[in-house]
Amino acid sequence: MRFYYNCSSKRKLNLLFLIFLLPLGLFAQKSGSRSPTPKPLYADPVYDGAADPVVIWNKKEKKWFMFYTNRRATDETADGVTWVHGTRIGIAESSDGGTTWAYRDTANINYTPTPDYTHWAPDVIEHNGKYHMFLTYVPGVFSDWNHPRHIIHLTSTDLLNWNYQSTLPLVTDKVIDASVYRLPNGTWRLWYNNERDGKSIYYADSKDLYNWQDKGKAIQARGEGPKVFKWKNQYWMVIDAWKGLQVFKSDDLLTWQAQEERLLEAPGKGTDDQAIGGHADVVVNGDRAYLFYFTHPGRVKSNPAPDNSTAAKRSVIQVTELEYSNGNLACNRDKPTYINLSHDKRHKL
């Protein structure tokens, strides 16, 4: 105490900082970033239709990149569902570990076999210094849903320019939403949505990411946007069930058990987060896992925007941290999310 009273005013303030404020800063660092992520996390400045996010580390630029479907929500001239077509994949970037994101560009995809085309729902991974994208390609711009769609394989060295490799030989000509994961034996598995079989989830295997063999149905459940990851010594799959995210778990990546509770079904309270969450990515970073998802803010059940209005079409990206309890996954979308992604702690394929 004598030391304290003999201190100068400046030293008193420094001591007070050490006693009271420094622990708060350490807590924030332990929790992730120093500031919580905003709501929404990201809104596309071009068409305001960001959806289907996937997040990956850009080794060369030392930034996090987010790829997303960029629906043309603000195009008031679009007929039918053409606003969901004619899209290119948007890219946002983050230099602060995923707390804030800024628009960067659209992906330069060197594959145009048809004059008009649509790009949806990419999955992007890095393996041996090369980036691989598995992208839904629709050969045109259509006013309804009754047209073919394929999953194509592209590669890149910079995450900006992409070269076509192949169209995957999957079970039908109407498939979407790839998710790729490396199996324990070093081979690869791709899950996707088979729209001609009740929108159930199918899978294919590959030894090298280039040659694929379709294996048939993975789960009977109806849904889109499968995402497979490992966390808490368990394999997980989340799919967009259009009433929240359905969760499945597996010990062998073949047999899947459904979790009773869905994620992001109940509305949140944050800005643009009061509708159900859809088509998500999961980033496992060390012992933590973050769920990147999108919402249609105008589709709040209690007060929906008019059909076909810009308010009903627009979509934004949100993020929340996953929680693990009693063998199940959960999340609290209203809890502040502190995120500070480290490329050294990311889940490596």
Image (cartoon, rainbow, N blue to C red):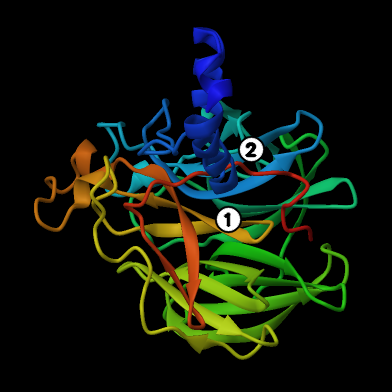
Name of the residue lying farthest toward the front: 2
Please name the residue that numbered disc 2 is placed on: 65
Describe residue 175's horizontal placement relative to residue 314 as left or right.
right
Q: Nearer the viewer, residue 116 or 286?
A: 286
Percent across and percent down for residue 182 are 78, 69
**Is any part of residue 134 visible from this angle?**
yes
Q: Residue at x 46, y 67 (%)?
A: 224
Q: Amino acid at mark 2?
A: Phe
Q: Secondary structure at mark 1?
A: strand
Q: Residue at x 70, y 44 (%)?
A: 342
Query: Badge 2: few (under 14), some or many (20 or more) residues near its Cα, within 10 Å?
Result: many
Percent across and percent down for residue 137 are 58, 52
Q: Nearer the viewer, residue 205 or 25?
A: 25
Percent across and percent down for residue 296 are 29, 48
Please name the residue that numbered disc 1 is placed on: 136
**Is any part of residue 34 visible from this angle?**
no
Q: Secondary structure at mark 2?
A: strand
Q: Residue at x 61, y 63 (%)?
A: 178
